[in-house]
Image (cartoon, grey):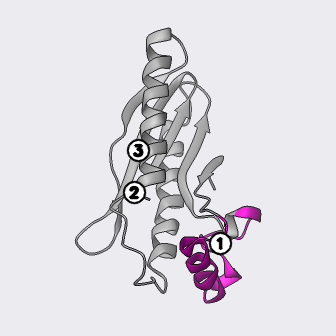
Amino acid sequence: MVDFCVIYKPERGSPVERAIEEICQTRPAQSINHTDLGDLCKRPIALSIETKRPNIDRDNATLQMGTWQSAQWRSLQHKRSPSFRPIDFLPGIIVQGHDWQFVASILDENDKPVLLKGVQLGGTDSELRIYSLILGLRRLKRWIMEDY
């Protein structure tokens, strides 16, 4: 499990919300996601965030994110609705101390999940890195709202 999730919440009564409800009826635990925790049942996970202490557990954070997103890919492939177009990648963020790193997983040619090497998104230890972080988070928000 990761520490935080950003969910996609479609407009109430929209075709997307109705499609999600229909999909939920056919899935294990009646959840759109690979977890049945609270609001995560009816709100697709758009971004996963894992946090760790500075200079400790980097490999563990990467393993947790990879495992979480692998389960998310399996869930997305389970009785996939033809009304939804497939997504190209699953985004994630690993926060370690002041450092925020963007990671993403994709499906390879055999439909096996692969976690790609992360890139620095920004940080909280200087104004410049905070601005970089804000810009990166805004770009992720736009992707979630427009493409996810």
Circle 3 Cα neighbour tier, 10 Å, few/some/many (<14 / 14–19 / ≥20): many
Query: Which residue of the protein is positioned furthest toward the bottom in this rendering?
Result: 26
Q: Are marks 3 and 1 in contact (CB under 8 Å)?
A: no
Residue sitting at x 56%, y 79%: 19
- Quadrant for residue 49, please give it: top right
The image shows residue 25 at horizontal and vertical percentages of: 65, 87
Residue sitting at x 39%, y 57%: 147
The image shows residue 108 at horizontal and vertical percentages of: 26, 66
Circle 1 Cα neighbour tier, 10 Å, few/some/many (<14 / 14–19 / ≥20): few
Circle 2 Cα neighbour tier, 10 Å, few/some/many (<14 / 14–19 / ≥20): few
Foreground disc of the pair 3, 1: 1
From the image, tell me which residue sits under label 2.
147
- Quadrant for residue 89, please give it: bottom left
Q: Which sits earlier in the primary sequence, circle 1 or circle 2?
A: 1
Q: Which residues are magenta?
A: 12-39
Number of the label disc, if any, that sits on residue 103: 3
From the viewer's perspective, tell me whether residue 97 is left or right of residue 92. right
Residue sitting at x 48%, y 52%: 145
Q: Secondary structure at mark 1?
A: loop
From the viewer's perspective, tell me whether residue 49 is left or right of residue 40. left
From the image, tell me which residue sits under label 1.
13
Q: Which sits earlier in the primary sequence, circle 2 or circle 3?
A: 3
Kind of residue sitting beneath label 2: Asp
Kind of residue sitting beneath label 1: Gly
Query: Which residue of the protein is positioned furthest toward the front in this rendering?
Result: 13
Q: Is residue 77 above or below residue 3?
A: below
Q: Secondary structure at mark 2?
A: loop
- Quadrant for residue 27, please give it: bottom right
Foreground disc of the pair 1, 2: 1
Q: Are marks 2 and 3 in contact (CB under 8 Å)?
A: no
The image shows residue 114 at horizontal and vertical percentages of: 34, 59
Marks 3 and 1, how far apart at CA: 33 Å
